Image (spheres, rainbow, N blue to C red):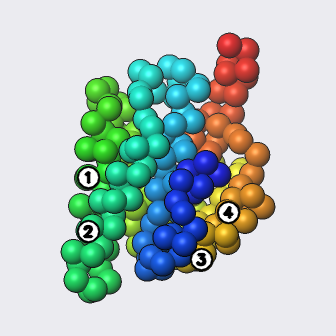
Amino acid sequence: MKRAIAMYKKEEFDERESKIRTILFGLCYFHSVMCERRKFGPKGFNMRYPFSDGDLRDSSIVLQNYMEGAGGSGKVPWDDLRYLIGEIMYGGHIVNDWDRLLCASYLDHLLNEQLLDEAELFPYADGKASFKCPVAATHDKYQEHIENELPAETPLAFGMHPNTEIDFRTT
């Protein structure tokens, strides 16, 4: 998360509309999950996909273009964003149907109106771990939120069973 949010220049990030900043925070979380699941090997994904910072960068460009195209209506085109990000930006790497379904499930949970209202970002943790998306803030506030509120890394954050950590550490 720290590396993903650090990709954005503070001045450029803070100039963006509040909705876009919040969605970018959600995209940073999504990117982090997609990249970090790889370390769990075949339990994370069925293949090792080459997700990169370019995927996040391109997704944020798509977001910015779509929001500018909305003509100031303020309506977020959630379906379009989920499709473009999930099927093209990240989905362009994914060749396994189960992995594609996982990507779509993450995006269905993240990219919706609830994200703008402090949504829970650990949807599968069943209350054992929690990390919420803060309300629209500045770049510094988001970095501070990540630093202070992000719990210790746990497979629960990725929607995986806690025993996955044992296998990862053993390997």
Contact between marks 2 and 1 (CB within 8 A): the answer is yes
Sequence-wise, the earlier of marks 2 and 4 is 2
The percent coordinates of residue 1 (x first, y second) are 61, 50
Residue drawn at point x = 43 percent, y = 72 percent: 20
Inter-mark Cα distance, 3 to 1 = 25 Å
Q: Which residue is mark 3?
A: 137
Mark nearer the N terminus (3 vs 2): 2
Which residue has dot 2 on it? 66
Badge 1 amino acid:
Leu
The amino acid type, in three-letter code, at marker 3 is Ala
Judge the density around disc 3: few (<14), some (14-19), many (≥20) Cα neighbours within 10 Å. Answer: some
The vertical placement of 150 against 162, above or below, is below
Element assignment for label 4: helix
The amino acid sitting under disc 4 is Gln
Q: Nearer the viewer, residue 57 or 118?
A: 57
At horizontal 45% and vertical 66% (from top left) the residue drawn is 23
Q: Amino acid at mark 2?
A: Tyr
Mark 1 vs mark 4: which is more N-terminal?
Answer: 1
First of labels 3, 1 by sequence position = 1
To which quarter of the image does residue 113 belong? bottom left
N-terminal of the pair, mark 4 or mark 3, is 3
Residue 126 at x, y = what percent? Answer: 63, 51
Q: Which residue is mark 1?
A: 84
Q: Residues within 10 Å of mark 2 (few under 14, many from 20)?
A: some
Could you tell me how far apart the alpha carbons at marks 3 and 2 are, in whole angstroms?
A: 21 Å
Q: Which residue lies under the disc numbered 4?
A: 143
Q: Are marks 4 and 3 in contact (CB under 8 Å)?
A: no
Can residue 45 be seen in the rendering of this structure?
Answer: yes
Compared to 74, does 110 lie above or below? Answer: above
In the image: residue 165, left or right of residue 113: right
